Image (cartoon, grey):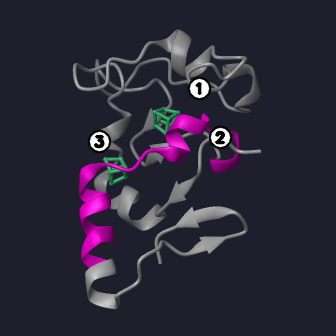
Amino acid sequence: MDIFPEYRDDDLCADCGGKCCMVYGPSQNLTRQKLHEDERHLYGGGHYLGYGVEPLSEKIHPHACEYLGLSGCLISWEMRPPICKNFRCGLWRDLNNDRQKRTGSRHLPVVKGKVTMG
Ligand code: SF4
Ligand code: SF4
């Protein structure tokens, strides 16, 4: 059973470029151990050996995740840490709240057990 529901909006996050992937900055303060060496998913992280891709040798920003490229996350969606697939920033939640007000929908659409933004 998935403990973390997955939220996915490729277009929104591509436009943003992955601001929430500045995971080592003061607002999120994650560690590599929690995010990429979390074999038992104690923190919702993943394990780098399962990603199928190497991290950047040089990060794009001192606070950035080592898997954040200029076009977003280098790891395929299926292989990403659960906490990454679960996260929605304030902008996303605000947009979704607006959408719910407009459409009257009280729930996000669910597709194959995954929650997505319609
Ligand atoms: S969740 Fe928000 S901050 Fe993160 S990439 Fe998507 S739009 Fe950007
Ligand atoms: S693994 Fe990918 S989605 Fe998660 S913080 Fe790093 S770049 Fe962002």
Task: Identify the amino acid type marked 2.
Answer: Ile
Q: Nearer the viewer, mark 3 or mark 2?
A: 2
Query: Relative to residue 104, is residue 36 depicted above or below?
Result: above
Q: In terms of depth relative to the viewer, which is nearer, 52 or 91?
A: 91
Q: Residue 46 is drawn in which quadrant?
A: top right
The residue wearing badge 3 is: 19
Q: Is residue 19 left or right of residue 52?
A: left
Task: Identify the amino acid type marked 1.
Answer: Gly
- Give neighbour class at mark 2: few <14, some 14-19, many 20+ (Cα, 10 Å): few
Residue 102 in picture, x, y percent from top left: 27, 87
Q: Residue 26 is drawn in which quadrant?
A: top left
The residue wearing badge 1 is: 45
Q: Nearer the viewer, mark 1 or mark 2?
A: 2
Q: Which residues are magenta?
A: 77-99
Disc 3 within 8 angstroms of ligand 1 (CB)? yes
Task: Identify the amino acid type marked 3.
Answer: Lys
By secondary structure, the bulk of the magenta-drawn segment is best described as: helix
Residue beneath the point at 46% across and 23% down: 66
The residue wearing badge 2 is: 3
